[in-house]
Amino acid sequence: MIPAVALALGLALGLVLQPTVPEALQPYLPIAVVAALDAVFGAIRAQLDGIFDDRVFVVSFVSNVLVAALVVFLGDQLGVGGQLSTGVVVVLGIRIFTNTAAIRRHLFHA
Amino acid sequence: MSTSTRPESRIDGSMSLLVDMQVAALDPSYADAAARRAGGGVAAASGAPRGRRQVSLPLIAMLVVVGLVTGVAVAQVRRDADRGSTVRTSLVEDVRRLTRETDLLAASAAQGRQEVAAVRARALGEDAQGRAAAEQIEALELVTGGVAVRGPGLVVTLDDAPEVAPDAGSARGGQVSDGRIYDRDLQDVVNALWLAGAEAMTVNGLRLTAQTAIRSAGEAVLVDFRPLSPPYVVRAVGDVDRMEPAFVDGPTARRFQTWTSLYGLGFTISRAKDLRLPAAAAPDIRLARPEGNT
């Protein structure tokens, strides 16, 4: 419950305040969001599996976002930023799908 | 990512990316941490029940950050989309405004030319030499498109084929035919009309002069650098009785008639008793400057 409220609070803050993102960071924002979503879904699944650990969540979230941003940054330097962004999104997307499927199995036993 | 839970290396190690993504979708370190807690964690086991303990402050802070990042990203994308459409709208607005301004300026230039002509006529009308000069100017203006003219003439209308036939091939004189009128076609017709004795001509209301270019940009035909769209109506003032047979029997018209029956191009010729053709835009002055200016 509290985590959901915290998530909604952050979402509302972001939408209402609309802080300006520095130009240099803008390309990484969507990637960071996908990486963060991956961490969140992983956390939900771990919670349902009964092995959730907040330290692991924090570490995996931060490292996910940083690694995703780093990969895209490297790609930008090499001129394949768009393709690597796609790659990151595909990999994280597959993980999100797998985790949601596991969550669904937990919740609905189907 | 931890590798401690990974089984010993597989034969298809390098091919297992997709399998890994499915199997290790959940960060393996969760399992590691759970194992650590279960194994040596007397403290963890004796602590508060798991559900309670997990809602810790860093977790909440992290979730707020996740929400914040998502919200900011959504807001950013929306704002960017807004900005894009704003830019487009303002560009369209600019184009419209500048077109209006151009029209106004062209109208005022035409009026200025009329005034100049009137003043000149008065000034030249005073003696015989002046009158001769005025006549010469008048004749030259007719030829150069400097004045609006009227008179009998021909109206030739060209249009794209109603249905663009994909298999029409390249039968049209080496030109790939897709049932369209191209700049070259329009040039042919205009040149044939000049040859047939036309004295003044417009294409879709734009007066042709010796300097008017008929070109194409992309798929649009440009006359005097203005894009036109079909149908293209060529109005030519001249001696109809001489012009019509010369044009109709000329190679260009015959070619177009063939294309009309083959590809369905629109091509019609009609006589007109009284055509009114506007003056051409004043020729561009590219290099000459009034003396004294740098």
Image: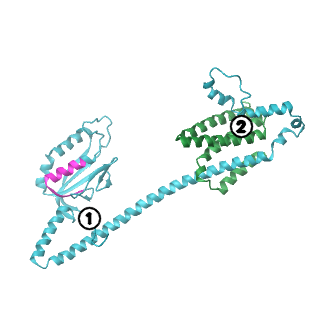
Chain colours: A green, B cyan
Location of residue B37 (image quadrant)? top right
Q: Chain of mark 2?
A: A
Chief secondary structure of the magenta portion: helix
Residue B155 appears at what percent x and percent y? Answer: 21, 54
Would you identify the image quadrant in which residue A96 lies? top right
Position in image of residue B217 (x %, y %): 33, 49
- Which chain does the numbered disc 1 sit on? B
Residue B282 numbered mark, or none: 1
Which residue corresponds to the image point at 68% horizontal and 32% vertical from the top-left?
B25
At which x and y percent is residue B31? 77, 32
Is A15 positioned to the left or the right of B181 in the image? right
Residue A110 falls within the magenta-colored stretch: no
Residue found at x 30% / y 49%: B216
Is residue A52 found left or right of B196 in the rendered image? right
Q: Identify the element where label 1 is drawn.
A: loop
Q: Is residue B272 above or below residue B107?
A: above
Image location (x, y in percent) of residue A52: 78, 37
Which quadrant holds residue A73?
top right
Specify whether B177 is left or right of A90. left
Give the residue drawn at x 21%, y 72%: B117
Residue B192 seen anywhere in this rendered image of the structure: yes
Residue marked by disc 2: A42
Per the rendered image, the range of residues in magenta is B185-202
